[in-house]
Amino acid sequence: MVAAVAANCVIGVDIGGTKMAVGVVDESLGVLHRIQQASDGEDATELLDRLTAMVDEAIEAAPGEVLGVGFGVAGILDAKTGMIAASPHLPLVGVPFEALMGERLGVPVAVDNDGNTSMLAEWLHGAAKGASDAVMLTVGTGIGGGIVANGELVRGSSGGGAEFGHMVVDQDGERCSCGGVGHYEWYASGDAIGRAGQLAAVEHPDSALAEAAAAGREITGSLVTEFGHDGDAASVEAIVKVGQRLGQGMVSIANIFNPQLIVVGGGAIAAGDLLLDPAREIVEREALASLGTNVSVVPAQFGADAGVIGAAVLALEQPAAA
C-alpha cells in the first residue's frame, strides 16, 4: 500500500513517444500541478536536460517536501544493468536513466516501463483495484502494457515484460517504427487512428476529415477522435476499424492470460466507446469459449493522467518497500 506521507508529495513523470508529462501528486493521488511538453526531435542529452528542467519546475511548485520522483518510460528497462535496453520512440537506448536522473535531481528516483507504472496505479487504486489477474494497455503513440498475474505485477526475467505493442499480428504487414513487421501498435494505436483518418479523408471527400485536410490541417488521432464525437461518419468509421484491430490483439491477450480485466489507458482512450465497443465485440466473439465472455474491457480510471499517477505511485512505493 502507499505509505502515508502527510503533507508531502512526489513527482510523477510520464515519458511517451511524443510527449512528456510531469505532475506533482499528493498522498490521495491528486495531481496538484501539471507540465506537458513534446518529446520528439532531440538527442538523449537534450531530452535529459529538458526533463531535468521540467522536474525542477515541478519541485518548485510542490506545496511540501518532495519525497521522490517516479518515471514511467516508453521503453524496455534492463533491471540487471539499469540501462534503457530498447525504445522505438525515444533516444534513450543505452542510457543509465535512473542513475543519471538521480544525480541530476538529488532526490530518490524510481524508474519503470510506462505500461508497468500505469498498471500499478490502476491495480492498486483504479479500475483494476482488487483484481488478481489483469492486463493494462496504454494506447497512445504506440501501445504499452502491464500485467498482473496471481496478484503480482509481472516484469519478466530482465524487467522488460509486457511489450504488447510489438506482438506480431500480421507477418506480411507494415513495418513498425521499431523495425519489426506487422506489430500490434501499427494497427491499433493512437497513431493508427490518425492513419485511418487520413485514408478516410481520401475515401470520403464530403467528410469533415476531407475538409480539414483540404484546409491544410494535419489529420491526427486526436482530430479524428474530435470529429468522431461530433458525429462525422468517416471519422467514426476510422475509429471503429482501429477498435476492431485493438480487439483482435485483445483476443490473444485473453486467450493467453485469462485476465479478469483488460484496462485501456493512454491518449487514445479519449475516443471512449467509439474505440472500445468494437474491441469488446471482437473479444466476445473471437476469444476462446468462456475466456472472451469472462473478461471486461474497461477504460482506465485515471484516464490520461494514468501515466503520471502511475509513476507517482512507483515513487511512493519505493520508501514503503525499503
Image: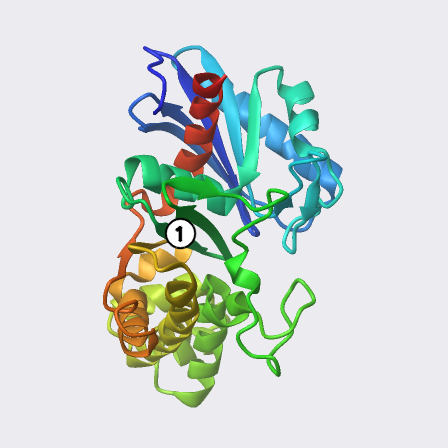
From what the image shows, is residue 89 above or below residue 101? below
> Label 1, on which residue?
136
Q: Residue at x 33, y 11 (%)?
A: 7
Viewer-nearest residue: 154 or 146: 154
Q: How is the image coloured?
A: rainbow
- The x, y position of residue 74, in whole percent, is 57, 47
Kindly indicate the quadrant of the structure image that contains residue 4: top left
Secondary structure under the numbered disc 1 in the rendered image: strand
Q: Residue at x 55, y 50 (%)?
A: 161
Kindly indicate the quadrant of the structure image that contains residue 247: bottom left
- The x, y position of residue 101, in whole percent, is 65, 26
Horizontal side, residue 226 vs residue 51: left or right: left
- The x, y position of residue 200, in whole percent, is 42, 82
From what the image shows, is residue 153 above or below residue 184? above
Viewer-nearest residue: 205 or 221: 221
From what the image shows, is residue 203 above or below residue 273? below
Q: Residue at x 32, y 76 (%)?
A: 282
Q: Residue at x 52, y 65 (%)?
A: 185
